[in-house]
Image (cartoon, rainbow, N blue to C red):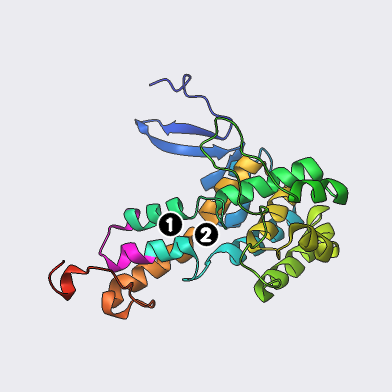
Amino acid sequence: MSTDKIHTRIWREEAEHDNPFATRAAFCRGYDVYGEMLGNARWVEMLYLLFREEAPSASQTDLLEALAVALANPGPRDASVHAAMCGGVAGSTAASSLMAALAVGAGQLAGGREVFLAMEGWALCGTDFDAWKKRLAGLEAIPGSIWPKPEHPPGFDPHGVSTATHVKQTLACLAGLSSGAFLPWLQQNLPDLETAAACPLALSGVAAAAFSDLCFSPEQGEMLHLLLRLPGAAAHALEQENYGYKRFPFYPVELEDDPAAGEMP
C-alpha cells in the first residue's frame, strides 16, 4: 500500500514489511521517535517538536516544562476544572468530562482565547510600552468573528485587586528561565502595565508571554494552553466521581420553584 498521498511535515511512518497497517518506524520532524527519542527525550521536547519544526534548546525545554507545571492544574476554583468536576460527579464518561473542561476553558476569561489575544499583543507590541498602553485601552470586536468584543484587557484579571502570589511566583520563575525578551520585560514593567490595564496580571498573561518567548504563534499558544490544563481537570473529575455529589466541594445552588421542595405555584 502506497503512502505517497499522505502529506505532513510533522510525521513520517515506515510500515512493517509484512503488514502495511503496522508501523515499523515513526519520525517526528525527522527524529526517530521509537528508535532514538524514546527513553532519551523529555515529554515537553516531544511536545515542542510537534508544534515547531525544530527541537527546543535546553533553555526552551526548561521554560516549557516549568510552564507545564504551572498550568497543569488550574484548581477547583477555575471554571474549566469545575466543569470537569461536574461531569465526574454526574457519572459522565471520561471524554465528556474533558470536553466540558475544554469547552469552558476555551473562552476569553482565563481561557485559551484570552491567551491567543494576549499573544497577539506580544506579536504586535513587543516591548514597546506606548504600544501596549494603547492596546490595553481597549480591543474592538473583529467583524464576522464568532468571538465577542473582549470585556477586559487579555492577560489581566478583571476581578483582581492585586497581583496574586502564584502569578508573581510563576512570572519570577519563568522570567529567570527565559532566553527571550518578553518575560523579563513583563516582570520589569509589570506595575506600569497593570496601571495601564487597570487590573492585575493573570496567569494567562504570564502563559502568553512564555509561549511568545518560546516562539509559538498565537494559534499554537491557544492550543497548548488548552492541552496543558487538562491534567488537573482529569484528576479532579476522577476524584469527584469517587466522592459522589454529597461531597461536592461547593455549596449547592438554591433554585427558585425547586420541584424537590414541593409543588410549584
Q: Is residue 183 magenta?
A: no
Residue 105: percent from left, percent from top = 49, 55
Q: Residue at x 43, y 51 (%)?
A: 103
Q: Are marks 2 and 1 in contact (CB under 8 Å)?
A: yes
| Amino acid at dot 2 | Arg
- Residue wearing tag 1: 101
Q: Is residue 86 magenta?
A: yes
* Disc 1 secondary structure class: helix
* Furthest-left residue in this view: 263
Judge by depth and name the residue closer to the eye, 172 or 193.
Answer: 193
Number of numbered tags placed on the structure image: 2
Residue 171: percent from left, percent from top = 73, 66
Image quarter hosting the N terminus: top left
**Residues drawn in magenta:** 85-95
Instruction: Assign the magenta stretch its main secondary structure.
Output: helix
- Residue wearing tag 2: 229
* Disc 2 secondary structure class: loop
Q: Residue at x 75, y 50 (%)?
A: 137
